[in-house]
Amino acid sequence: MKWLLRTWEEQLVAGLDRLLGFPRERKRFLKAHGYPLNLKNPTSFNEKICWKKIYDRNPLLPVIADKYRMREFVKEVLGAEAAERILMPLLAVASRPEDLDFDALPNQFVVKSNHGSGNNLIVKDKSSFDVAAFNKQANAWLREPYGIRNHEWAYTHVARKIMVEQLLLDASGGIPADYKFCMIHGQCEFIKLDNDRFNDFTSTLYDSRWNKLDVRWRRPQAAYTPPPQHLNEMLAVAEKLSEALDFIRVDFYVLGDRFYVGELTNYPVRGRGKFTPTQFDIDLGRKWHLGRQQGVHNGR
């Protein structure tokens, strides 16, 4: 019953926020960026992310937000053979964690929910994996009403599942670098390289030609890193996957001489990812024309 009460609470909070003109959303936005959120005439990149999550009802967005159904979208766009080469290897999927056969899995793997962010567990040694404890945790993930309180519409229309993927590690045994391609109207406007996410987390921005940008997005920047071996191929894939959308972020992992599509992201940092300098946020927003793929809703 607790999870049901939490869902009702989330819906009540979100409903009141919407009814009152999004004061809670506006307060969080102002705190994150230092300037007020304008939903009636959004101009900055982050304002348009907020507009998108509140008003955009493109039926493709829940498909993309679903880490499981996203795989079918990639296959439809790229073709099954090309997609299989770059999708993260999927080992199992189930609507209940109790239905997963962990005995049939390899010694190392990753388990995650398909409908939210941060609900994942890296297993490097199955012999120390507590299945009962995991089932309890995974069921808590499945009960989580992700997306409601922060108006992230796409997540609220995902049929929840637990996925198991192959664990891919770099040469040092760590999680591989994460390359996030920011795609606006099918063009890559910048690439965010995330390194060492579980320790000394850095985020470094580059343009599509791999020139380092003097822009900070939430976290410290690292020193210049050479471009990935398959940068042009990754750009081509990101362009194809973003063709039908006004905005999407295409996330890749690079491992040795291969790259993989990790996930597709509709609402980076819920529209609260602060850029320094702020002018970059404004300039980026000018390149994004809301309504090109769908009718613009007049926000309050």
Image (tube, rainbow, N blue to C red):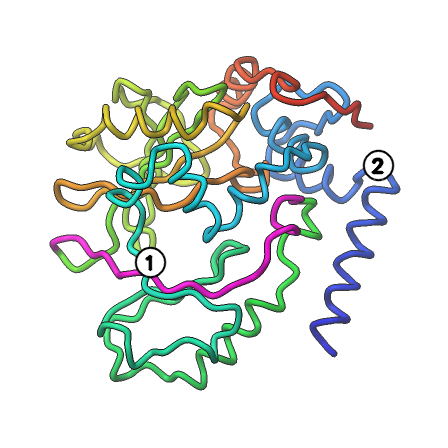
Residue 16, numbered circle = none
Q: In the image, is 137 to the left or to the right of 146? A: left
Residue farthest right in this picture? 19
Front one among 241 and 75: 75
- Inspect the magenta stretch and tell me whether residue 128 lies in it: no
Residue 79: x %, y % from top left: 33, 35
Q: Give the quarter of the image for residue 294.
A: top right
When the figure is inspected, residue 126 is found, relative to residue 35, above or below; the finding is: below
For label 2, the crowd category at 10 Å Cα-Cα, with few meaning under 14, some 14 to 19 and many 20 or more, is few
- Inspect the magenta stretch and tell me whether residue 154 lies in it: yes
Q: Give the quarter of the image for residue 11.
A: bottom right
| Rendered-image quadrant of the N terminus | bottom right
Q: Amino acid at mark 1?
A: Leu
Residue 245: x %, y % from top left: 53, 26
Identity of the residue drawn at 45% across and 34% down: 249
Which residue does the numbered mark 1 point to in the structure image? 90
Quote the CA–CA distance across marks 1 and 2. 42 Å
Mark 1 or 2, nearer chain start: 2
- The part of the chain drawn in magenta is 152-171
Q: In the image, is 58 to the left or to the right of 167? A: right
Front one among 40 and 93: 93
Q: Amino acid at mark 2?
A: Gly
> Which mark is in front, 1 or 2?
1
> Which secondary structure lies at badge 1?
strand
Q: In the image, is 30 to the left or to the right of 285? A: right
Number of numbered callouts drawn = 2
Which residue does the numbered mark 2 point to in the structure image? 21
Residue 150: x %, y % from top left: 67, 47
For label 1, the crowd category at 10 Å Cα-Cα, with few meaning under 14, some 14 to 19 and many 20 or more, is some
| Rendered-image quadrant of the C terminus | top right
